Amino acid sequence: MRKTRRFHTIRPGSRTVRHGAGVRRFALGVFAALCTALSAAAPGAEWEPTKPIRLILPYAPGGTTDLIARIVAGPLANELGQQIVIDNRGGGGGLIAMSLIARAQPNGYTLGLPALSAHAANATLLRKTLTYETERDFAPVTFVGQSPLVLVVGTANPAQNLQQLIARAKETGRPVSFASGGIGLAAHIAGELVKLRAKGASMTHVPYKGGGPATAGVMGGQVDMLFAPTGSVLPLVRGGRLRAIAIASKERSAKLPTTPTMIESGFPDFVMAESWGLLGPAGLPEAPVSRLHDATALVLKQPEVVQRLDEQGVELATSTPQQLREYIRAEIKKYRDVIVAANIKVE
């Protein structure tokens, strides 16, 4: 955002003020003008959008990120008094969208809603090809929500829990196959973490082109298991097409009360979720950050928004910009540790 500069110009031929009172009035006028200019440029100055805001999503329409954006966009537009234009820019593992956000003018009119797991994983997996710096080139606005990962198997799979699945692999010598919607996504990293901790059990990653095909592969029995956000598999579990055998949250979910946590399943500190945060380009001034943060926080507390996303297994939560920055930093480290230990490479 450009700072408004106001100049008081004394033109040639202007009448010179010689009287003391006149000089004082002139000085006070200049002082008042300067105060007005400084106030307008002050970091704490209020900001209101005067044109539509572009919300860039790193994925194609239809996924959980797109669903969150469309449920939140309407109420947020009402709160800000401006239209929110959703721009789906899938491809490149999220790099296309994140590059657009990083290069945008830091004026409050371009924002992004990435899945923070993929955003964090890319910092390690694609560090040689990234056109932006994951921490430096974005301005955090607020955390938006999360959906704990659920471990599911097909209903034809005899394993009733994770320990049985691992034990059968050890007994038969047959690797446990785990699906994901792509290399570096939360589902992939979670599977690799199980592989690292399940000593003596062979496991094989089977990447698909998207979460939908990966889920179909598990339902059809082509792949043994899949980690997926709660909302994306909850209808299939309730409909008897998938079986949930563990959830990667600190406590059991009210939506899946009989499903044990990964911690209960013998994997200490195994907590993983797909999460989302609102980001802008680096250099976004404090005023628009504050306005966008406050407006989003109000929207995420609206009962209808909470209910609609709760039905999809998304737990809404907000944060300060600094808390979101720290969360992203912690996610980068968590994913980097797994990626390095499992020697994950992007082909």
Image (cartoon, rainbow, N blue to C red):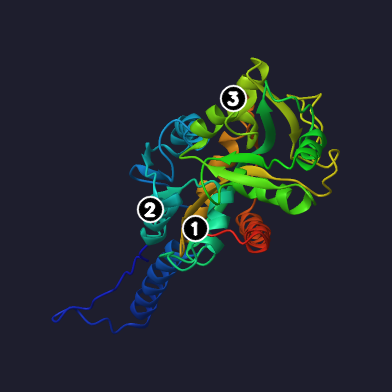
Q: Nearer the viewer, mark 2 or mark 3?
A: 3
- Examine the rendering and report whether any part of residue 44 can be seen: no
The amino acid type of the residue labelled 2 equals: Ile
- Residue 4 x, y percent position in the rendering: 34, 65
Secondary structure at badge 3 equals helix
Instruction: Examine the image and state in which quarter residue 229 appears.
Output: top right
Q: Secondary structure at mark 2?
A: helix
Check disc 2 and report the residue beneath it: 96
300 lies above or below 185 = above
Residue occupying the point 19% across, 79% down? 15
- Residue furthest toward the front? 172
Circle 3 Cα neighbour tier, 10 Å, few/some/many (<14 / 14–19 / ≥20): many
Residue 135: quadrant of the picture: bottom right
The secondary structure type at the circle numbered 1 is loop
- The type of residue carrying mark 3 is Met
- Judging by the rendered image, the residue that carries numbered circle 3 is 219
